[in-house]
Image (cartoon, grey):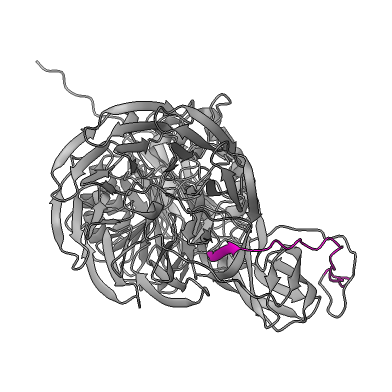
Amino acid sequence: MWPVPVPPPHVALEGSVYSDTNGDGVRQVGERGVAGAVVAYERSLFTTTDAEGRYLIDAPAAGLVWVRVPDGFRPGAVWRRAELTSTNIDLALVPLTPEEAASPVTFVVASDSHTTNEPTDKWDGGNLVDALEQATALPEPPRFFTIVGDITQANRIEEFQRVAAAIATIAVPWVPVAGNHDWYDGGANYRGFFGIDTYSFDIGNVHFTVWDTNLSEADQLAFFAADLARVPPEMTVIGLGHASPSDSVAAALEVLGVDYLFTGHWHSNRRLDRGSITEWGTQTFIMGGIDQSPSGYRVVTITGDEIVVEHRERLLRSHFEAISPRPGTCASPAGFPIIAAAAFDATTPDVLVRIDCGAALPLVSAGGWSFRGVAPPLAIGEHTLTFEATTGRTRLIRSVPIEVCDAEASALALGEWPQLGGGAAHVGARAAPVVPPLGPRWTSTIGGTLSLGSPVIAGGLVVVATTDNGAGDRGGLVALDLLTGAERWRYRTPAPAVGAAAIDNGTVVVATKTGEIHAVALADGSQRWRRVASEGAPTFEASLWAPPTIADGLVYVALQSNFTALDLATGNPVWSRDPDDPQFTWLGSLAAVAVDDGHAVAAFNRTLGLANWSSYTGAPQWSVRDGRTEAINATPLIDGGVVYVVNAAGAVSAAELATGTIQWTVSVTPGAFEWDYSVTATPAIAGGRLFVPTQWSDLVALDAATGRELWRFGTAGGPLNFAHYRSAQPGFAASPVVTGDIVWIGAPDGRLLALSVEDGHVLWQTQLGAPIVSAPAPAGDALVVATFDGTVRLLAPAVPRAPRVSPIAMCPTTSRGTPATGGCAAGADPSIALAALALGFGLRRRRRQRRRP
């Protein structure tokens, strides 16, 4: 006979949900029960408290009991462990203060902090305490702060302890979300520190569901269904999870009535439209992103039916600089633009300037980090600009000496630089020199964050691509007059632009992160055609990471799921090929297609290596898929029948263009591995030398024939962190450009450097006031340089003007520390306080009513 199975023990869990008015976690006399609160055992058994706040659950075993925090109480995971010997479980809810209850429904979303406590690892986890302080420094404290998974690096107890200690330093409620790195032991350590991994809470008319993407898809959907069954259909539903759901799960969540999702895991900044659901994937919180986004987070505000999603960069140090005019330059006596860049934390400051201690001139936000105003006519001579940025808790000042003079600009010979690296082979070089010293002819704000890559130049226009790391619902192109910097036209795309635009035959082509290709007229920005290259592809494979390339009348687009050549005139496909299925469908490549002599060389994805196709027919020629071509993010370049490529571990390889035979491979970042992404920007080649920018401090010059290292040049760090698996690593996010015998490269600390191609020594440098993260573009005698704050300038040969050496005048202050007007305190100590602002764009979308299956 078969043995009779013994049913598992059941536990009658009972207790009360009460208002813990003094927040001590112990129920006192007079602390009332909370009626109608939803209480659950683990992920499946739900009940509701009675009029006295009591509940009863017949649980199958010991486990975690939690309460959905109702509106009016501090949100988060409120739970207790139920043991077989202790089944009376009271759950304490801490009521909001009147000030907290009246504050905006604002919350902060970070992701993938990967906190570690391994001292021998080059990834040290960074300064989590400082990052938390920045992210929660809003005028009114956010309702909660969350890291949507991969809170720890290796699931160690010591890592959870470090996170818990950091969280204890902020007063903002903490909403933990489990990630795959937090779940190596099946959740034991995570649940020991943070408790239940699936839970929910309400704020106003918004319901938040925290779900564990480590579970099977069936279990994830079962929890959503059970949780949302007790949510009124008119409420907005927001899901907080780690990994982006599959298309089938997203479709099911749409049916269940989910409106928005906030996820991480990709180490990239993304927005996805999943039917009627909008999903935002936030990049890494401390380290730089795989998509070359700097470490950052999102600030989300819900007001009535609207949701506003903004982005902030996590800063290594505060940034407050005058962008224009710069010391040592000549400002026009007829008036001139005044531009400042400010970035500090999550708070938006007010920025103003005083000219010679006169009346305050407010500077208006111009997008990105830029604030802009216009100076009135001034007398020729020396003047002082005193910039000030203030928030509710901080006042920051910087004084800058300038000279107003009536200098006549010399004539310029202007040229073109129509796509990344100057052409379809992306060599990043030209023989004609640009001779320093250089000075600004004009500086313009473009109204947002610049896409990484490079400005492009043709037909007397500078065209820059814009992006949006906040709501992710906008991007596009801005065209500036090459001689004056005046805006000529603007074209908006419905998603952020990817990398540099490309220009040929009077047509500008730009790609978006969602896989759309837009072509507009160079003359006026009018649309010529639009093609959805990602149409029909699964969501993850539809994301486009790389900019377009134009050659021989064709536009080359390398999606993970499709390699397409489009007719430049019409946008119609000329040929289309499907690469192999990638292993990591959510990890594309930033590398543009390199085209030369009938060959199109592409890297589609982290695992698909390097492939060569006929640029005319799309017929495959060869592929190299091994460790040397794993995880390529830097655009390949072609020169003299050789393809040069760099992978994520910093391995540089030279391959024969005709056959794919590897001639040599060397490492420019010794000790790096394939997840470090130590090289992401495109190299340049000239005169038999290959110049490789690394995220690990150095620009490295190699002999192009042998790979032998010739020299290195290291950079100081800036306010941003772009390096993956590094917390404060200086390095080059910008590509170099070679003109004549000079290598030009922008540094993260705002310096534009002119280096000798022979030995890398500094020939000349200038400080532009903001991080340079895209390549300069040669324009005849001049360079066009864009900076991260959202400004573009033309730097042309100029007679150097020595900055004033006499003490600058500081404005006197009142007894309250506010600058007084009327007169200057000459000779005062020009103390400099660095300051403060990271701006994002907002999304406004009407809430829809949730459907029931």
Q: Identify the image quadrant of the C terminus.
A: bottom left
Percent from the top left, x then y, of residue 551? Answer: 26, 56
In this rendering, does residue 28 appear at all? no
Whether residue 805 is in magenta: the answer is: yes
Q: Quadrant of the N terminus?
A: top left
Residue 467 position, x and y percent, is 42, 62
Question: Number of marks in the image?
Answer: 0
Residue situated in front as seen by the camera: 620 or 777:
777
Front residue of 200 and 177: 177
Q: Residue furthest left?
A: 1
Is 603 left or right of 735, judged from the image as shown?
left
Vertical relation: 572 (above or below) 431: below
* Residues in magenta, as a range: 791-817
Q: Position of residue 708 (x, y in %)?
A: 46, 27
Left or right? Give the position of 90 relative to 568: right
* Residue 101 vertical placement versus 421 (above, below): below
Q: Residue at x 36, y 42 (%)?
A: 42
Q: Main secondary structure of the magenta part?
A: loop
Residue 747 visible (yes or no):
yes
Which residue is at 23% across, 46% downward?
Answer: 597
- Give the residue displayed 36% in from the left and 37% down from the top: 645
Residue 679 in percent (x, y) is at 45, 39
Q: Quadrant of residue 322?
A: bottom right
